[in-house]
Image (tube, coloured by chain):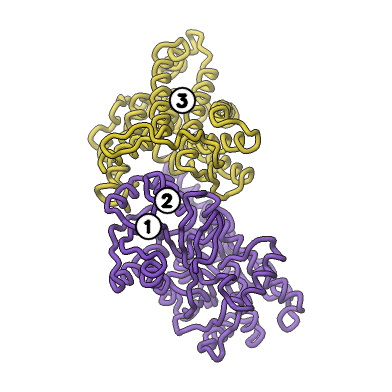
Chain colours: A yellow, B purple
Amino acid sequence: MFLQQLVNGLIIGGIYAMIAVGYTMIYGVIQLINFAHGEIYMLGAFFAVTFISFLGLPFFAAFLLSMICCAICGMFLDVLAYRPLRESPRLAALITAIGMSIFLQNLAMIIWGSRQKPFPHGSVPAYFGQIAVTFGGVNLSWFHIFIFSFTLVMMLGLHLTIKKTRWGKAMRAVAQNQTMAALVGINVNRVITYTFALAGALGGAAGILVGAYYNSLYPTMGYVAGVKAFAAAVLGGIGSVPGAMVGGVILGVAEALGAGYLSSLYRDGISYAVMIIVIILIPAGLFGKLIKETKKSM
Amino acid sequence: MKKTKNFLIFGLVLCVAVIFGATSTVMAGDTIRIGVASPFTGDLASYGDNIKAGVNLKLAEINGAGGINGKKIELVWGDDLCAPKDAGTVGAKFAADKSIVAVIGHLCSSATLAAMPIYVRAGMPVISPTSTNPTIGDVGKGWFFRNCYTDDFQGKYLAKEVVPNLLKKKKVAIFYENNDYAIGLKDSFMAGAKESGIEVTGAEAYVAKTTDFTPQLTKLLTAKPEAIFLCGYHPEGALIAGQARKLGFNGPLFGADGIDNVDYIKIGGEATENTYCTVPFLAEASGPAGQAFAKNFKAATGRDVDWMSANAYDCLGILADVIAKTGADRKKIRDGLAAINSEANGYKGVTGMTYFNSKGDCAKPAFVKMVKDGKFVSAR
């Protein structure tokens, strides 16, 4: 049972991680907790289903197209909702984020209805359901393998983008000091918008994976996932990308093992308890740096 | 400091908005107004659709025949999302609106339990077509009635009749939602299982709106149960069915009235085959009145009748009968409902004979349905 629970935990943990990096990247560049991020995740799942059932696209094409749409949604979110408030107190942007979250949730209810929907039957490649490897009594399907490898590739790609590319450098510069970044010729607003696009694409991908793997999507699905991923980002140290990855996996595994060995009734409680304990012991989170609160008061 | 102040102002505005929202009343015309409380949006909106279809059909019949003593009935909808906190808001709104003389609802037991104290304080008679939690009668203090059976009965029926005689299984795992309905049902099932010698190999809980049930299922399946009790509602039930099959469980699944919804099959697909559930009304297995109703229902709404619609239809029928005798007054309606206390003066509706005991509960039989080839059919 331990191995099976570990697999369960790694799957959901990888998904939390993909959402959590979105929170952490955006926090890194503009110190905003983007509460509407969970809704981008929800939109990802709904876009994919719409492309599959109305345009008849195959799974992977819909997957890619949906990620692009989520990236665009992320950019719109920034340009329409947050950019006008760039110079306002942080509280204003935070409230706006909550407002956008409620707005997007209700928009999705109007467009797709409030009922829970299945992922279109037969749209996921048939071999996904087949067993790829068996070890220690645990069956791993190709879908498991796909989720694992996709998450890994995305995380690695993200890490390299941030560390090795010019654009990643610009992003890190903006995160460190927006004024200085602007002075050396970085278009700060564009970097921020692109960060939203990247976060959106990853969040959307997570939404599609969850929708397809657990075979269910509904307009309010972003809320719980968003809160969990936010907890994962805080656990890893908000603002730190590797922290969010590790935080997501820890939270997922803690949840699965907690439900398996302690009490399933307190499954969510266990994962949050892990977060609280870490934050008490290491206030900045696992990978975070303690920075003094300077400028911009609330 | 500034932050706290901002929050205080925000909270104050919110309070004012809630109070105004709750007390705003619509002027009553020459109609009898009855509140109907159900989840009309959200995950369980399809249940609300069932209730709406049932009461609307009865409404059209009553108003089409000239109303009650010349007065037409008007329904007021209250969306409680099946959530206790929203049920409280709906309850306060209905209670404050003096033109509303009775309430049909709420649908979910948790919602009814939350709203009931408000109705008791306001002296509002409530009749629920669907709330099956056994404890509501105590909270209702004489103002609560229902025309469905309770989970006490349903859980024991599952444990003593369905599992041993229909499924012919001996080892059962329980997977229950952490709410009033499911916990009540689980407890009565366990009590019944003890009497009929069924072994409960494990009981695990989940929280509504979860999508990942694999950790709990993994744990339940290690004890090798022969059947799994889906003790909750259909949206989660459908996902649990899918994930249980993915984890290699091929035995039968069974549940109570919460599972009975076409969406269960729509969401769960093939995984839902071989699922059994108990329902208070089943057209195929009921008498001629029920059969005729099923036909009318199909003609009027274009869909197959479900037990919630049938019970809701009868709820409005019972209220209309009582109001015709007593007049449209909250207290008199309550007394009229309480007077329906034996088979001799019971209400004969499409769901059979309804009469209430001192707690407002009624004794009614259960029927069993199953999923076969992507459809709900009678299990016997």
- Depth order, front residue of A71/B224: B224
Q: Mark 2 and mark 3 in contact (Cβ < 8 Å)?
A: no
Q: Which residue: 32% across, 42% down? A: A255
Instruction: Say whether marks 2 and 1 touch (CB < 8 Å).
Output: yes
**In the image, residue A22 lies at what x, y percent?**
45, 29
Quote the CA–CA distance across marks 3 and 1: 49 Å
Q: Residues within 10 Å of mark 1 (few under 14, many from 20)?
A: many
Coordinates of residue B306 in the picture (x, y in percent): 58, 65
Residue displayed at 42% across by 64% down = B181
Circles 3, 1 touching at the beta carbon (< 8 Å) = no
In this picture, residue B66 sits left or right of residue B138:
right
User: What amino acid is at disc 3?
Assistant: Ile
Pinpoint the chain carrying mark 3. Answer: A
Q: Which residue corresponds to mark 2?
A: B240
Looking at the picture, tell me which residue is in the foreground, B378 or A31: B378
Residue marked by disc 3: A30
Secondary element type, mark 3: helix
Q: Which disc number belongs to residue B186? A: none
In the rendered image, the quadrant that contains the N terminus of chain B is top left
Q: Which residue is mark 1?
A: B228
Q: Nearer the viewer, mark 3 or mark 1?
A: 1
Rendered view: A35 above or below B259: above
Horizontal and vertical percent position of residue B51 = 60, 65
Three-letter residue code for mark 2: Ile
